[in-house]
Image: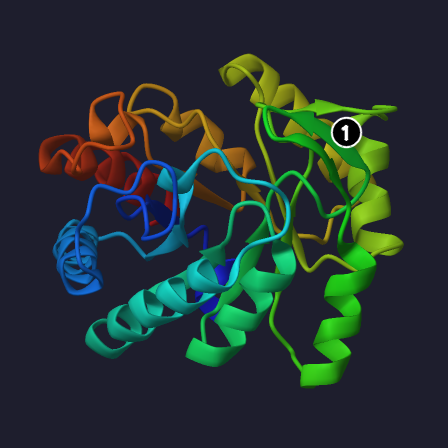
Amino acid sequence: MNKKLLNKPVLAMLQPPALPGTFKYNGETIEEIIEICLKEVEMIASNGFDGYILQNMNDMPIKQNSNFQTVAYLTRIATELKKEYPNLLMGILVNWDGLASLAIAEAVKADFIRVEHLYTGANVTSAGILEGQAIDILELKMKLNSKMPVFADIYEVHGTPIGKKTHGNAAWEAVHETFADGLFTSGKDKDESIDIIKEIKERVPNTPIFLGGGATGENISELIELYDGVSVATWIKDGDMSNPINPDKANEFMEKVDNKRN
């Protein structure tokens, strides 16, 4: 695993405009979309972030299994970003297909994948029921002889789990029964996020656990002391993930993290 993943990294969520072939696609060429992504990664780098997670969030609504064009376009985007910014951490998150994430990550030599909603268990979402892909992801890792770290979300806040277990038990199963290398989790507010990380750390104390959402300039100083890393999107984009990064907020956020890391 990349050592940078073990040093409380701060990762921005990089979410391109809707890709060709999706309901919200606005007609941009892939070259125009790549240029938008390159400008945002330039801002991510200049504001001191450790890296980013490339996610096709704007392709909603999305079923569980990705389509061919999404894999192709995201691979093209990721290739260009990796070429221009090889020293930044890159995670891949395909909505909502961990197999597609792994294939893209291996093709572009990313640093990890984030499997949201569906590594273990089952989740009810606006797109229907999503089922855990852990077995299929591990089988694909074997086929590809892959060492790609898999970070699995424990109860993504926008889904409704079927047969929900405690966060601690769900985390233990993800690590010890389906061999996740790391975890993402978050609560609906700061206090719930603190309660969750304390519970999970008791069950899987040696597993890196990243905050998946809810980080702000007001709460990050406290949360980064407990979590092993963080992904941030909404707060540094003025409340709307479709906005560009606000450099003033990004700078404030990173200053507070660096005060805790140094």
Residue 77 picture quarter:
bottom left
> Is any part of residue 2 visible from this angle?
no
Near-viewer residue (167 or 23): 23
Q: Which residue is under mark 1?
A: 167
Q: In screen coordinates, is 60 left or right of 237? A: right
Q: In screen coordinates, is 115 left or right of 207? A: left
Q: Identify which residue is drawn at 11% across, 38% down.
A: 247
Q: In screen coordinates, is 7 left or right of 163? A: left
* Residue 70 x, y percent position in the rendering: 44, 58
* Residue 178 x, y percent position in the rendering: 83, 56
Coloring basis for residues: rainbow
Q: For mark 1, give the secondary structure.
A: helix
Quick check: 117 above or below 136? above
* Residue 254 x, y percent position in the rendering: 25, 41
Image quarter hosting the N terminus: bottom right
Near-viewer residue (116 or 29): 29
Q: Identify which residue is drawn at 58% across, 46% down.
A: 96
Q: Amino acid at mark 1?
A: His
* Residue 249 x, y percent position in the rendering: 17, 30
Q: Identify which residue is drawn at 45% across, 71% down.
A: 110
Near-viewer residue (82 or 198): 82
